[in-house]
Amino acid sequence: PGPVNLNDADEAALDALPGIGPATATAIVQHRQQIGRFTSVDQLLDVRGIGEAKLEQLRPLVTV
């Protein structure tokens, strides 16, 4: 399958990504609900639990 869309993925799809556990998957979904759709993969840095290293690991696996 192709990259996971941060704006469409549910918690299970996000949790399946390497380095993303249930808590971070929930945080991504909550961020999307509170702030709105992601317009850039870089916005993952605004999600609790995601730093530069994790963003670089996720970058080829996700899209918006």
Image (tube, rainbow, N blue to C red):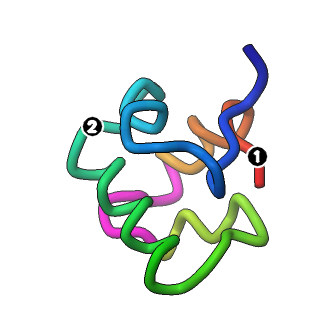
Instruction: Let me know if residue 48 is in the magenta part.
Output: yes
Q: Secondary structure at mark 1?
A: strand
Instruction: Let me know if residue 63 is in the magenta part.
Output: no
Q: Secondary structure at mark 2?
A: loop
Quadrant of res 47 = bottom left
Between discs 1 and 2, the one toward the N terminus: 2
Q: Magenta stretch?
A: 47-53
User: Most prominent secondary structure in the magenta stretch?
Assistant: loop
Identified at 37% across, 69% down, the residue is 30
Of residues 42 and 26, the one nearer the viewer is 26
Q: Is residue 36 above or below residue 42?
A: below
- Is residue 12 left or right of 64 when viewed as pictured? left
Which residue is outermost to the left? Answer: 23
Give residue 48's position: percent from left, percent from top. 32, 68
Q: Quadrant of the N terminus?
A: top right
Q: Label 2, on which residue?
A: 21
Q: Quadrant of the C terminus?
A: bottom right
Q: Is residue 46 above or below residue 60?
A: below
Which residue is outermost to the bottom? Answer: 35
Label 1 crowd bin: few (<14), some (14–19), many (20+), radius 10 Å: some
Give residue 28's position: percent from left, percent from top. 43, 60
Q: Label 1, on which residue?
A: 63
